[in-house]
Image (cartoon, rainbow, N blue to C red):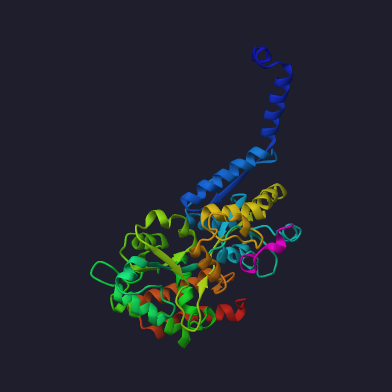
Amino acid sequence: MKKKIMSALFGAGMITALIAQTASASDAKEVTFWYYHAESTTQELEKIIEEYNAMQDDIHITGTWVAREDLMNQYTIGAVSGELPDICMVDSPNTAAYVDLGIFQDITDKMTGWEGYEHLFEGPLASCKGSDGKIYAIPNNTNCLALACNMDMLNEHGYTEPPKTWDEFYEIAEACKDDSTYGFVMSAVSSEEGTFQMIPWIYASGGSVADIDSENVAKGLDHLKALVDNGIMSKEVTNLTQADAYKTFCAGQAAMLESGTWQLASISDDAAFNYEYALLPADETHSSCIGGENYAISTSCECPDEVWAFLEWFGSAERNGKWADVTGRIPVRDDAAEYVTSWEGDANYEVFLDAMNYAVARGPHSQWTTISEAIRTAVQNILLGTEDTATALAEANAVIEPIIAENPLP
């Protein structure tokens, strides 16, 4: 009866086409994709997934947002249970650790045979490799850190431009401090976000993660400790995420902020004052830290070729540039900049591009999680005053040194 009604309405030819289309759609392989992008970025990703689902019948991708820590825990559990999404989002410094767990497929041949391979920036690409040198993920985006300044506040205290050196930074931060305003805010939370924001202060004075107990590293962290000790920065930064610190700055409660590339997309709407970005202040050198995420195909995935086709399509120069454009990231390809149109002529975006020249990677290292925890634990103890700088860094070094002696940082 249904067939007769359909025939009357559409005709036999259209019925055949509809049946064929339905059959084709039902034949599409179901693919799961879990990610922890922020809300605005998730909305953009959902549009991309919908676009790809509509343009082909090989796979149907279902995207699911999962809180970052929950997702990382699921990867660890999945290493034993085998229950994993087909496409895995992973923070760039943690990629090597999950490679060691055996949950990502080796995509070296796919990557090296891809036209976009030679256009990938070295830093993001390096974060996709395991300790065996093989490639297990494709970089999706990159970002770094710079200094955001409330120029209304700086001007009010006689400063016409952002600080360039640590001495200038301290002077301006101290001048802008009052009963309701701090001179500087950042995230020193006990998570990877805190480590991310601490790295520039470790490297700017000539130190590194590999010599965490050195005088240079101590100098950088003592510089931050002096801000806390003198009320220029709140001890509460040890509880603030990057989003919390950003909100504090946008509310006019801090004169300067250690800010990420992604915050450029919203700061004009969120801050009711004139602002300006600059490189993070230098001691021996300017410094920043590379962030970003990678996408990997899990070992549970039964259609890796079809999934790779999606990742390859998503990773084209045009789509990578447009993705960076709408999400406030930096492209991972050197030929994608022409598609980042919304930032054209934006001096603040140019600051972040410049900062990439000074930005260092976290790892990559299969035990980065352990290394990172040792760093942020030391920093928290220093800022909170529960340990002196030398003791805190010596304890961190006791954890880090044996790890990198066996498997050096690149």
Asked if residue 267 lies left or right of residue 357, the reply is left
Residue 74 versus residue 359 in the image, above or below? above
The foreground one among 78 and 335 is 335
Residue pictured at 72% horizontal, 27% vertical: 20
Q: How many labels does the image show?
A: 0
The foreground one among 243 and 69 is 243
Instruction: Give the magenta part as a residue range.
Output: 115-125
Residue 176 versus residue 303 in the image, above or below? below
Residue 95 versus residue 305 in the image, above or below? below
Asked if residue 27 lies left or right of residue 163, the reply is right
Residue 30 versus residue 336 in the image, above or below? above
Q: Residue 329: image x %, image y %?
A: 54, 59
Q: Residue 257: image x %, image y %?
A: 39, 67
| Quarter of the view holding residue 134 | bottom right
| Magenta stretch: dominant secondary structure | helix
Q: Is residue 378 visible?
A: yes
Residue pictured at 34% horizontal, 62% vertical: 248
Q: Residue 381: image x %, image y %?
A: 37, 76
* Residue 116 counted in the magenta span: yes
Residue pictured at 53% horizontal, 65% vertical: 350
Q: Is residue 315 visible?
A: no
* Residue 360 counted in the magenta span: no
Pick the quarter of the image with the C terminus.
bottom right
Pick the quarter of the image with the N terminus.
top right
The foreground one among 346 and 3 is 346
Q: Residue 49: image x %, image y %?
A: 59, 44
The foreground one among 273 and 33 is 273
| Quarter of the view holding residue 377 | bottom left
Q: Residue furthest left?
A: 179
